[in-house]
Amino acid sequence: MSVTVARMKTDQIQHGTQPDDGANFKGGIFIYAEPGVVFQGLVQSLERTFPDIQVNLSSKLAEPEEFDAGVGLVLIHADFVPDIADCIVRCKMRFPAASVTLMMDEHSSALQQFNSLFDNKQIQGLLPFSLKLDVWLAVVWLLLNGGDYYPSSIIRLMEKTSNKLSGTANSLYNQPKGNPASAWPVKTLTLREHEILQLLSEGLQNKIIADRLALSVHTVKVHVHNLIRKLRAHNRTQATAIYRNSMDNHGLKPFDATIVH
């Protein structure tokens, strides 16, 4: 991810910034979260700030085949969703014209996954709850106008923790042979994730993997995000490195991708 670009985007959001009359908004706002006092208050603030935009708050997503092109921005409460990657896929199918942004705690344990989603352009923004309301509304204005937002506070946090995360990953690679702990991350994967990880290690792209396993590309993306999270890796390249290390250190055999589930 370009830290410089991310900082430039952040620097455009100043305290007290309000959308001007010439704003070219993409459409309405859909908030996927558990209705409650906090989110009801945010909806009211959005409606006061953007009186011409329809704002909907719901804890349910309609079936993906029911498209809604009138929504320009989807805000997802990350802690409300058990499977972020799958939820994003469903939202993109449900709202094909919308940008997708995660509302989250900037100290969330899943921050690395959120960062990966932003890097891979699966989402257009990360919106921490720690922002002051006027800045929060200004970020929504930017997102409605087709911009991206990655807060500088998360950039600083990621820079501080990157060395620790790298050290943890390296310790997985360098554990002595015969130590069961070094194989533990791979053992947490499902059979389908083992299949996909093996094909990733062969350098295959999502589209080819989907064709090989008779899956949709979206489904493969969901599995890739899940296995990266389970292996505590930064990206798919590091995930395949952990896989190869487990194969070498423990004499594991390649998974048989021809098995029908």
Image (cartoon, rainbow, N blue to C red):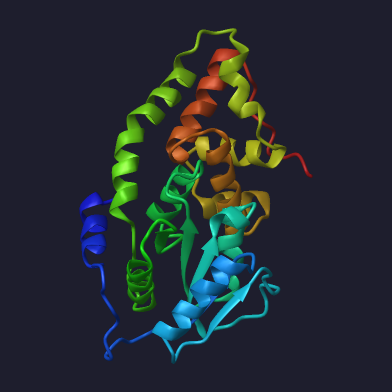
Instruction: Using the image, determine if residue 38 lies above or below residue 118.
Output: below
Q: Residue at x 54, y 47 (%)?
A: 225
Q: Classify residue 177 as left or right of residue 142.
A: right
Which image quarter: residue 5?
Answer: bottom left
Instruction: Using the image, determine if residue 84 lies above or below residue 75.
Output: above
Q: Classify residue 58 as left or right of residue 149.
A: right
Which image quarter: residue 78?
Answer: bottom right
Instruction: Using the image, determine if residue 219 lies above or below residue 35.
Output: above
Which residue in the rendered view is the most extreme toward the right? 261
Residue 96 appears in the rendering: no
**Quadrant position of the C terminus in the picture:** top right
Q: Residue at x 60, y 20 (%)?
A: 183
Q: Classify residue 97 as left or right of residue 215.
A: left
Give the percent coordinates (x, y) of residue 25.
37, 85
Front-most of residues 69 and 248: 69
Q: Residue at x 58, y 63 (%)?
A: 89
Front-most of residues 259 and 165: 165
Q: Residue at x 33, y 87 (%)?
A: 24
Please tell me how many numbered marks the rendered image carries.
Answer: 0
Give the percent coordinates (x, y) of residue 255.
67, 31
Front-most of residues 245 and 4: 4
Give the percent coordinates (x, y) of residue 61.
67, 71
Give the percent coordinates (x, y) of residue 195.
64, 39
